[in-house]
Image: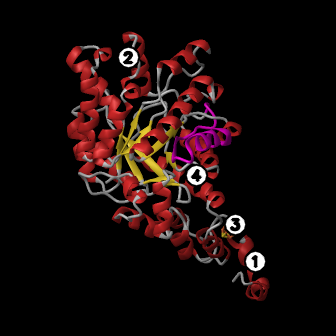
Amino acid sequence: MTQIESARAGAATKEMEAVAKAEARPVEYVIEMIASGKAVIPNSTTRKSGHVGIGKGLRTKVNASIGTSSDLIDVKAEVAKAIAAEDAGADTLMELSVGGDLDAIRKEVLSAVSLPVGSVPLYQAFKEAIERYHDPNKLTEELLFDVIERQCADGISFMAVHCGLTRLTVERLRKQSYRYGGLVSRGGSYMVGWMLANNRENPLYERFDKVVEIFKRYDCVLSLGNGLRAGAVHDSLDRAQVQELVINCELANIGQEMGAQMMCEGPGHLPLDDIEANVRLQKRMSGDAPFYVLGPLATDVAAGCDHISAAIGAAEAARHGADLICYVTPAEHLALPNRDDVIEGVRAARIAAHAGDIVKLGRGERDMAMSKARRDLDWKGQQRHGLFGEKAAAIRASRAPAEPGTCTMCGSFCALDNVNEFFRENLKAGGKA
Ligand code: SF4
């Protein structure tokens, strides 16, 4: 049985119990969310991994993506990036290689980390079509479904599949005169090319029941890819993107009914005042299926610092209900990320997720504990409660203060040190000590 089928039968799986413990939630709550399709647990019948809950009432999760390109194929470097992402606190990893021996790279990455690992099978399907037939548009349905099954069998726990990208959505692109930002989804652009070159409907849509059956066999989460996501703030919420979202929300419900765990994917690039609308649309139309957003980047002009642009958008998306945030690195739009880019990307996305959770789940103990430690000049406490304690301690140690209680920002003019003592009694009386 899949997680959703077990939940509907009222039975807690060990994965649901692990999620309940990690989220400090009753297991009955997790069962209810999984059964109703409002949460998912990326899983695999062929590989053991950590258990992460994604969905309503659960902490917003962060995904880091790694993988070779056609220009840079260094498997050791990709494995190092995967390990760095896990060490930096990513909740899930996507292995998105397009260069080299993709089956071998996937297996190496899967064995190097304990995170649930996701993929985009269209990359490998089109790459193999090019290798076999020297033309991506000669991709056959058999090869496409074979690649999906192969990746599931290897232990992939969630997969972005572009089922909602149909001729109807492509027609919207034509009628709206294309886009300022073009198409930015690799898998999406290849599938659009395939449909136009072959004058055929997307087989992932036409044979959606076959896709779902494969995912059920491995209890893998089917994440409905956002092939027409906006890649420019001026394209945000255009008709093509919304058309695909409508279809994806419909498919999410069909897949859930069939007994598969389903997520929807979102943009992309969105100005801040469109983010709430996009999250609400997805939640309303899918009946609260988990929403996996790629960023979204809140401005197009931050190249070199796009992890910050994405974190701003991701915080807004998370506060309105997005459940999984795909990180963006400083190398976005410029080059294949290196290990340092991966670490910075995970850090930025974790801040965004936590900032969103302060609104979505309530002001928690951690921020209060950090504030008190900061007020009390308790540097060890700050290191313990901060998201990046080691980095904070290293910065402080690199510029040590003359007065050990303060820091070199203000030194002997430390505002906290100057007045704390006058408020000790008030703190005790007000319960804020
Ligand atoms: S010296 Fe300034 S920045 Fe440092 S702890 Fe005191 S008030 Fe804060």
Q: Nearer the viewer, residue 65 or 152?
A: 152
Of the residues under marks 4 and 2, which one precedes in the sequence?
Answer: 2
- Helix, strand or loop status at disc 4: helix
How dense is the environment of label 3, judged by Cα within 10 Å: few (below 14), some, or many (20 and up)?
A: few
| Residue 202 pos. (x, y %) | 40, 22
* For residue 163, side relative to residue 105 (left or right): right
Sequence-first tag of 1 and 3 = 3
Q: Amino acid at mark 3?
A: Cys
Q: Which residues are magenta?
A: 276-301
> 283 above or below 428?
above
Identify the residue position indicated by label 2 in the image: 194
Residue topped by disc 1 = 418
- Dot 4 and dot 3 residues touching (CB under 8 Å): no
Residue 112: where, in percent of width, then height?
A: 26, 52
Residue receiving disc 3: 410
Does the segment drawn in magenta span residue 233?
Answer: no
Q: Which residue is mark 4?
A: 352
Q: Position of residue 199 (x, y in %)?
A: 40, 10
Residue positioned 59% across, 35% down in the render = 302
Name the N-terminal-most of marks 3 and 2. 2
For ligand 1, the image quadrant comes to bottom right
